[in-house]
Amino acid sequence: MTISHHPPEDLLADFAAGRLEEAHQLVVGVHVAGCARCGRFVQAIEQLGGLALEDVEPVPVASDAFEQVMSRIHDAPEERAARISEAARGSEQDVPAALRNYRIGKRRRIAPGLSMRPIELSGSGTARAFLLRSAPGSRMLEHTHTGTELTLVLQGSFSHEGGRFGPGDFDYGDDEIDHRPVVGDEGPCLCLVAMTGDLRMNGLLGRLIGPFVRL
């Protein structure tokens, strides 16, 4: 698999430092897990962080801190197992291992040839995550975003003004980017998406149907 499009370096640095919201951390993490180039960059950032920690004055912790952490881990094994089992039953074929720890909701049609499945997150951030499936050859109306959109291709491909995006490729969209993705003809396109805000459709037709397209 050849990956041509990667997250910006500042986004990778925030990922390495654990500063991203859960939805963004999930999408970037799945990309990093499958991309040797970004994996090396993140590893370098983590090593720099480790060197910086060596200069930090140690803080005393409770004598039973380890026991408390282990107790929390073992408190709810059945709940965790049920969650993983449900996610596995409801997930798409060949989704990354990272998604198998999440509940994935039922498929919802949002436009002709376009459907989504929400991913249940545990955090309280403003970004939401979902799987987006598009039919082969489908075209979206030209649009921009009122927030940010992080998209990782899992299967298939799409193209827009920024190039062609295939499995493993990462696409970043915000309110400064107008694009009109077109899905490749080789098969359905499945993407993992983290989004804040909404889509803003351009043109008269876009403004008419925009209120009915909810991601």
Image (spheres, rainbow, N blue to C red):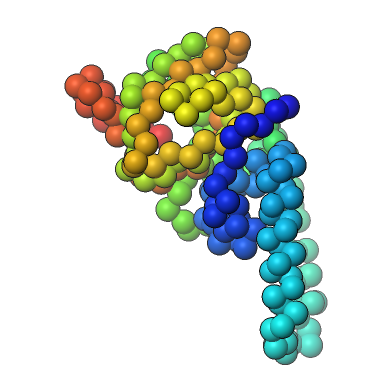
Give the percent coordinates (x, y) of residue 92.
Answer: 64, 27
- Is 212 on the left or on the right of 120, as rendered? left
Q: Quadrant of residue 98?
A: top right
Query: In the picture, which quadrant includes the C terminus?
Result: top left
The foreground one among 82 and 133 is 133
Q: Quadrant of residue 10?
A: bottom right
One can see residue 98 in this view: no
**Residue at x 55% of width, y 47% of height:** 8
Give the percent coordinates (x, y) of residue 27.
Answer: 59, 43
**Residue at x 68% of width, y 25% of height:** 93
The foreground one among 169 and 70 is 169
Give the percent coordinates (x, y) of residue 109.
Answer: 43, 23
Image height check: is 71 above or below 89?
below
Q: Quadrant of residue 69?
A: bottom right
- Is 23 on the left or on the right of 45, as rendered? left
The foreground one among 196 and 170 is 170
Image height check: is 76 above or below 34?
below
Query: In the picture, which quadrant includes the N terminus?
Result: top right
Image height check: is 13 above or below 83?
below
**Residue at x 55% of width, y 41% of height:** 119
Give the percent coordinates (x, y) of residue 190.
Answer: 57, 25
**Residue at x 39% of width, y 23% of height:** 180
Q: How many marks?
A: 0
